[in-house]
Amino acid sequence: MREKPLHSYKLYIAGKDVDGDGWVYTVSSRSLLEDVFTSVGLKRELESDPESEAAQHPYVAGRCAIAGDDAIDLATEAAAAAAPGWAAVPLERRMLLGTRFREELLRHQDEFVEMLVTEAHPVRLARWELSCLLQVFSEESLEWYRSQMHTEFRHGPRRLIVRRQPDGVIAFNPPQNAPAPSAALAVLALMAGNSVVVRAPRSIALSTMWLMRDVVGPLLDEAGAPPGVLNAVCGNPRQTLERWLADPLIDDIFYIGGSQEGLRFQERCVAAGKKPILELAGNDGIVVWKDADVAKAAEAIAEAFYGSGQICMVPNYVLVHPSIADRLIAEVAERAAEVRPGYPEDEDVLLSPVRRSERFFALLRQALDQGAELVTGGRRTELDGTPSESGVFLQPTVLRVDGLVHARGFDVVRHETFFPLLPIVVAEADDDDSLLEDFVTFVNSNDYGLRNSLWAKEPAVIDTFVQRVVNGGLLKVNDSHIGFLPYLPSHGGTGLTGGVFGEANYPMLKTSHVQGVSIADDISPRDAVFGS
């Protein structure tokens, strides 16, 4: 029997809990590792008969109501009705929402982590995801957002204002791999003065509905926001996105997902007169120069395997100076061996189950056929780390690829794989000036552009990267690749990562637009145009 009450969330529309068209249930990730047949059977039984006693099974974590067409439209209508009143609230009052959200995240941090662990996030990665939000909503970051939203100048008898105004109604489509932390970015759109509709992914809705309904909703009530400023619905992705595209009340759509699908969606948004805000795939690179601290660089590179590589902002390939390549590869192999599978609540676990691994093995075979060398990994593994043919985990896998010239011909180098599969590209021997030029060119030629990292000590090398790497939304030097910092963006990038409007993504700025204002005191319009 259950030890805790079942989390149960209806649709959240216009400040009210609204019935949906049935329920979708969440079973604990642990159950999928212990007894996958029972967990799948429980979901099927409950979704056909919500009154079943199966709801008392300890594997069942919660349920969320499912939105149909009418409910999706109702949420949009509620957001549109609330938008003018919320936009009229002074910026300083709206900014307080960010401070209060951070306070509530800290107060509910154990529950936040527990929700993510239930949805198969290893506990250490759940805390990392929390650290992202704590930096995004840090006092330093909030003050910077505020300065970008409203700046004033004096120009003779005029008061000049450069400010950002809200776009209106923003629809959020978070991804399945990190729905709640991504949905939390909607708070920034709220701070900008927008109203929002958030779609909780139907297959993994619980954490998102909990965060929106039990954390953000009460904060908006506390702030006196009009009902409808926040709406959260659990819905089918295609159905929901189609209705958003067709609805004239939606102004922006914040889309997080795959690159090809996202770029096609971008075209449809523009055709429908909507602003697409894209967070798509990443294919992050780490460059290791000859004077790098090899041990620390290997630590950062091993972040590639966290969450089994199913995180957009982990490293996806490495470029290494040939003079230290052997040392670095040996060090990375050692670090990879330390990244192990297990139950997500176990403190030492960093690997996540990979349900569909066929493409992993296809990419691995392709790379080996093209001449890559397998350094370590390459097999399925059981919960305890034992290699097997049927395990639900994948070993952290390192490949050596010799030569920059043909490296982009390897799919594992050119594209995000979303697996614990890391190619280390060893450059051809050459003089350092030529190698540095080749490294910068290689990084800038990446079709994607989320994050890039450099490990080097020589100031001239660092300066060259800082000045000349134009690809990506974030560049880290001698630092964790996936760590978060105040002021700097947590998301955003160029190319296949951010679409044609891609750049570092500050959602408060992305969901608003610049406006200039002049307030004059005793000015002659004629003199202003022609001079006195």
Image (tube, rainbow, N blue to C red):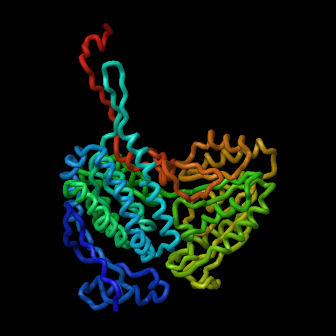
Residue sitting at 28 percent across and 91 percent down? 53
Q: Position of residue 529 (x, y in %)?
A: 30, 13
Q: Quadrant of residue 362?
A: bottom right
Could you tell whether 18 is left or right of 310 in the image?
left
**Residue 110 placement (x, y as % from top left):** 42, 72
Q: Is residue 62 left or right of residue 339?
A: left
- Going by the picture, which residue comes out furthest to the top? 532
The one of 24 and 133 positioned closer to us in this rendering: 133
- Left of 332 or right of it: where is 52? left
Which residue shows up at 64% across the image and 65% down it? 302
For this rendering, which residue is in front, 397 or 180? Answer: 180
Horizontal and vertical percent position of residue 18: 19, 69
Quadrant that contains the N terminus: bottom left
Q: What residue is rendered at 62% in x and 73% in y?
A: 339
What residue lies at 41% left-to-right and 64% top-to-bottom? 106
Quarter of the image that includes the C terminus: top left
- Quarter holding residue 330: bottom right
Percent position (x, y) of residue 293? 73, 56
Q: Quadrant of residue 8?
A: bottom left
How many numbered circles does the render carry?
0
Does 252 sit above or below residue 65?
above
Position of 331 relative to 289 (above/below): below
